Image (tube, rainbow, N blue to C red):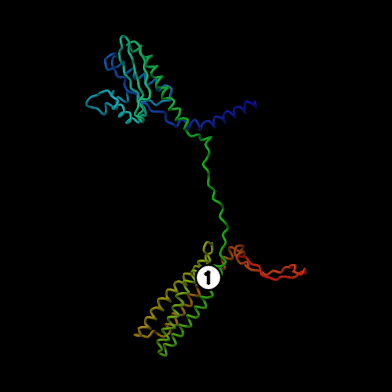
Amino acid sequence: MMKRTIALAGLLAGLQVLAPVAGAQEKVRPPVVAVFDIEQPMPVLKPEELVTLTNYLSIKLGESGRLLIIPSKDIRRLIAEQKKESYRTCYDEACQIEIGRELAAQYTVSGSLGKVGDSCLITAAVYDLAKAATVKTASGKGRCKPDELIQAVESIALALEDALAPIAAAKLERAPDPVLAKPPPVFVAPPAPPFRPSEGSISWARTAGVLGIVGGLGAAGLAAGAEMTKWYEDDLASNLMGAVALTLVGALGPIMSSASNSARLGTAADGSPASRLAAWIGYGLTMTGGGILLIIGLTGDTVPPDGLIGAVGGVGLLSLVLFAVDDFACASEVRSLYPEQTAAAREAPFSPFISSVRMPDGSTGAVLGVAGRF
């Protein structure tokens, strides 16, 4: 019982393996052949008897299933539709080529019936529409009676099918084998190296924050000085200090912003978005207000209200302090997110060392130096 079960399982497995191959072969379309009516230049048989022989030829050609046959009755219907004014059988080669191509056939089969003495001779030819050439001919003979010519039609069908069968077999051999075909190679990308933040960008963010605060204090001091000299009607000194303060704030704002951007570039750090937004708003107000005050001071037409120059300087200081908050936040967040990488980046490139060496006189001495990575 166990042996029968194993044998049955093996048979089912074999059928499952062979099923995809058979399915792939069934998808390959055999050659399509259009069979035209047999022509009789001189009346030998009745028209209906000749139609019967043509239909029999179509049936015999498609009997094995290796060829797809377009029967002559379908061809006659197409000819009748194209030539509605008068039905005329399509016997000449040009007409058969045109009809065959309209039917999407690859080959056409045409035949002719003639009488030689007391016997009738049937000839047939296969025409390749792609090559525009006749690829096979066959013939058969018998007494000029329909039942006597059946054997001749059978021999012609066998000869023509044997000529077209290798073409169908070659197409089936070229069908892809889903079981044996090798799968396409799959490209696997190499793993990306671990991300290592730049210690230089982190240090620069901290440095830019300190410079921004110092520069902001300096700009605020210059603004206060411009406010005071205005009281003494020293327009030159007031305008000069105001211009320097405005230039200082205008240069430090973008520098500090770029420092925080470089620190968090490629990381998940956000820094302080609220401080960054408020800093840009204050920066815009400072540059706008300071520019207007500088124009007023240079033209000398009007005197700015008291305290306005100092207020603009205070807004500039505040904006730079907010930029500094963002810089410090970015640097600290990156170091907390990537402690191992930033620790490795902070390793000192140089380190002292001491070693013993043998001196030229044979004694042992100590060497003190510095080792470094380049």
Quadrant holding the C terminus: bottom right
Q: Residues within 10 Å of mark 1 (few under 14, many from 20)?
A: many
Tally of marks: 1
Instruction: Tell me the amino acid under the disc marked 1.
Output: Asp
| Residue at x 27%, y 26% (from the top left corner) | 80
The answer to which of 144 and 159 lies nearer the viewer is 159
Query: Which residue is farthest bottom?
Result: 232
User: In the drawing, does residue 307 fall left or right of residue 44?
Assistant: right
**Where is 54 relative to 267, above or below?**
above
Residue wearing tag 1: 327
Q: Position of residue 345 (x, y in %)?
A: 60, 65
**Where is 132 relative to 187, above or below?**
above
Query: Which residue is farthest front?
Result: 361
User: In the drawing, does residue 268 fall left or right of residue 236?
Assistant: right
Q: Which picture quadrant has residue 87?
A: top left
Q: Position of residue 116 (x, y in %)?
A: 31, 12
